[in-house]
Amino acid sequence: MHQTPAFADVFQQAVRASGLSLERIQHRLAARGIRISLTTLSYWQRGRSEPERAGSLRAVDALESILALPPGTLRGVLRPYRPRGRTAPAAHDLAASRRVFGKNSPAEQALGADFPALNEDTSVLSIRETVTIDEHFRLSSLSIHQVIRATREGADRFTTVHTFDSGARAVRAEVRCGIPGAIRFLPRMSTVVIDVRFGRRLAKNETVIIDYTVHVDSGDGLDDHYERRTRTPLRDYLLHVYFHPAALPELCHRYYRESHEAQASYNRRVVPDASHSVHSAPGRCPAGVHGISWQTL
């Protein structure tokens, strides 16, 4: 009996034959008004998921043209819609994400349908981040070092989202460890979405390090805090904030909230050191919101 080929196999062969990268394919879809993330295209190619929603099926029709396939080639090998055979891990479900990011957050708006599955192939073990605040009390740069573990076979990238409260006219990302993928800056939301690729597919439980810096051309607002939202506990977390020597804060506090809407359950004053910096290094780092706030003179 003849067996219909899998969508992933047909799509992968067509991509290979076209000589186009997934980034080029994404750009050609975008030129037709179709927004599909690199993560989604990668999942389709690897058989991790298949197009089901109306917008995804519209992308399939466009892909047949972009990849010079006869009409119906990709549509014809799609399986009928079926409920998901597995549920997302609790740390990556929509409720858990909204608990720390807030409902309809800039991250959710920027990622759209991909938000519930954000980095579902990975977990973050440790984060060390350095924030630089300029003489106008605006965030000017953000450097992040993360240790990431693959929770499933085949993880090949990590997506990070940053929103700047003081506004941002432009951003520039510099990836030192990892391979820079797509970088999308959304000026209306002062939000940047950065894909960092690992350069290969990881085995389950394999670890990888990513290290990058975001340089910000700030808007006209002021920053009075910086916080990290994590859906899972971290083994290690360090937040280090540098202030301009000509603009030191009057008071600084480090704090923790269990969720986006919760009141701070921990709030302790911290004093700038000789380098005009303050830091937070909690002995335990549960899921939730960890941050440092400051007041100006």
Image: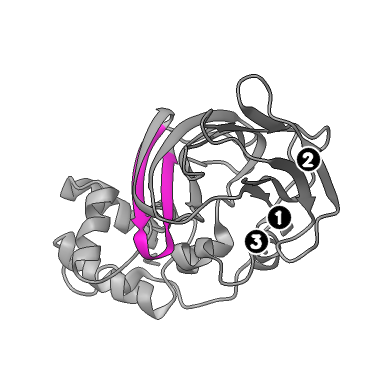
Q: Position of residue 200 (x, y in %)?
A: 43, 33
Residue at the front extreme? 297
Q: Vertically, is 83 above or below 246?
A: below
User: Over which residues does the magenta segment extend?
Assistant: 179-196
Q: Where is residue 128 in the image (x, y as percent from the top left)?
A: 62, 31
Q: Is mark 1 on a helix, strand or loop?
A: helix
Q: Mark 3 points at which residue?
A: 97
Q: In which quadrant of the rendered view does residue 206 lie?
A: top right
Q: Where is residue 123 in the image (x, y as percent from the top left)?
A: 64, 42
Q: Most prominent secondary structure in the magenta stretch? A: strand
Is residue 245 visible in the rendered image? The answer is yes
Q: Mark 2 points at which residue?
A: 285
Q: Nearer the viewer, mark 2 or mark 3?
A: 2
In 3D space, how far apart are the residues under numbered discs 2 and 3 (Cα atoms)? 17 Å
Q: Mark 1 points at which residue?
A: 91
Q: Which of these two is toward me, 269 or 16?
A: 269
Q: Vertically, is 150 above or below 80?
A: above
Q: What element carries label 2?
A: loop
Q: State which tag comes first along the sequence, 2 or 1.
A: 1
Q: Residue 218 carries which label?
A: none
